[in-house]
Image (cartoon, grey):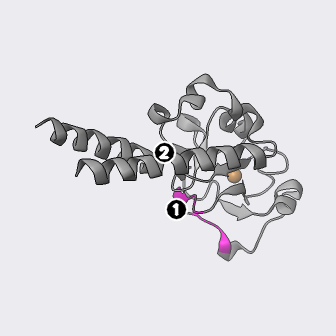
C-alpha cells in the first residue's frame, strides 16, 4: 500500500516536471499595439515545450517569428510567413532567444508591437524548482543565460536521474 502511494507521488512529481505551460501573450490585452510586452515577459519564465498564444481580432494584426536584426529594425518577412488566425499558437521548441513582431502597418516600429523572450532548456514546475520561488538566479537569466542555464540544466538532470533511480527501486 505504502509503496503504491510512493509510486503515485513520483509519477505526479515527474509529470509536473514535464508539464508545459500556455502563455497568452499580453494576457487579457492580447496581441496589440501600445502594450509593453517586455514588461509582460519580464516576470515569466519560458521553457521548451511551453506555448505562446497570440490573440487578436483577425485582420487587425498578425505574427511573424523573426531574428534579432529584423526585430530591431521591425523588418517584415514575406507575408506568406505570417500567422494570421487571431489565435496563433507557437510551441517553444528550442531554447534561446525568440523574437516576434506584428507585420501590420507600423505596429512594430511605432506601436511597439514586438516581443522578445528567452526560452530555457527544460520544463520545470515551480513546485520542484525552489529557486523560482526564491527568485535567485532568474534575474540574471534573460541577459546572458549561459552560466545559469548550465547550472539549471545539470540540476534538472540530477533530479531526473534521482527520480529514475527512485522509480526503479520502488517498482
Ligand atoms: Cu499589429
| Residue visible at 25% across and 47% down in the picture | 170
| Residue visible at 69% across and 34% down in the picture | 138
Q: Separation of disc 1 and disc 2 at Cα?
A: 39 Å
The location of residue 158, given as percent across then percent down, is 52, 47
Q: In the figure, 103 relative to 152: above or below?
A: below
Which residue is tagged 2? 159
- Which of the image's four quarters has the N terminus? top left
Apparent side of residue 104 relative to residue 73 in the rendered image (left or right): left
Mark yes or no: residue 123 visible: no
The location of residue 100, given as percent across then percent down, is 71, 56
Apparent side of residue 22 relative to residue 167 in the rendered image (left or right): right
Which residue ends up furthest to the top in the rendered image? 134
Number of residue marks = 2
- Residue at disc 1, secondary structure: loop
**Ligand 1 near label 2 (Cβ, under 8 Å)?**
no
Specify start and end residues of the magenta stretch as a single range: 81-93
| Residue visible at 71% across and 36% down in the picture | 35
Q: In the figure, 76 relative to 96: above or below?
A: below
- Residue at disc 2, secondary structure: helix
Q: Pointer 2: residues within 10 angstroms few (<14), some, or many (20+)? A: some
Amino acid at each position: 500500500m505504502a509503496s503504491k502511494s510512493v509510486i503515485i507521488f513520483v509519477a505526479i512529481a515527474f509529470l509536473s516536471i514535464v508539464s508545459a505551460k500556455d502563455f497568452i501573450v499580453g494576457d487579457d490585452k492580447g496581441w496589440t499595439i501600445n502594450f509593453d510586452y517586455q514588461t509582460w515577459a519580464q516576470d515569466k519564465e519560458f521553457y521548451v515545450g511551453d506555448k505562446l498564444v497570440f490573440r487578436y481580432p483577425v485582420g487587425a494584426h498578425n505574427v511573424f517569428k523573426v531574428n534579432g536584426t529584423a526585430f530591431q529594425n521591425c523588418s517584415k518577412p514575406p507575408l506568406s510567413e505570417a500567422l494570421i488566425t487571431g489565435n496563433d499558437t507557437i510551441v517553444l521548441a528550442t531554447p534561446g532567444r525568440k523574437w516576434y513582431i506584428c507585420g501590420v502597418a507600423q505596429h512594430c516600429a511605432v506601436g511597439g508591437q514586438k516581443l522578445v523572450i528567452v526560452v530555457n532548456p527544460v520544463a520545470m514546475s515551480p513546485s520542484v524548482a525552489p529557486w523560482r520561488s526564491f527568485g535567485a538566479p532568474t534575474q540574471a537569466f534573460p541577459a546572458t543565460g549561459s552560466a545559469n542555464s548550465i547550472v539549471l540544466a545539470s540540476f534538472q538532470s540530477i533530479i531526473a536521474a534521482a527520480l529514475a533511480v527512485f522509480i526503479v527501486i520502488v517498482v
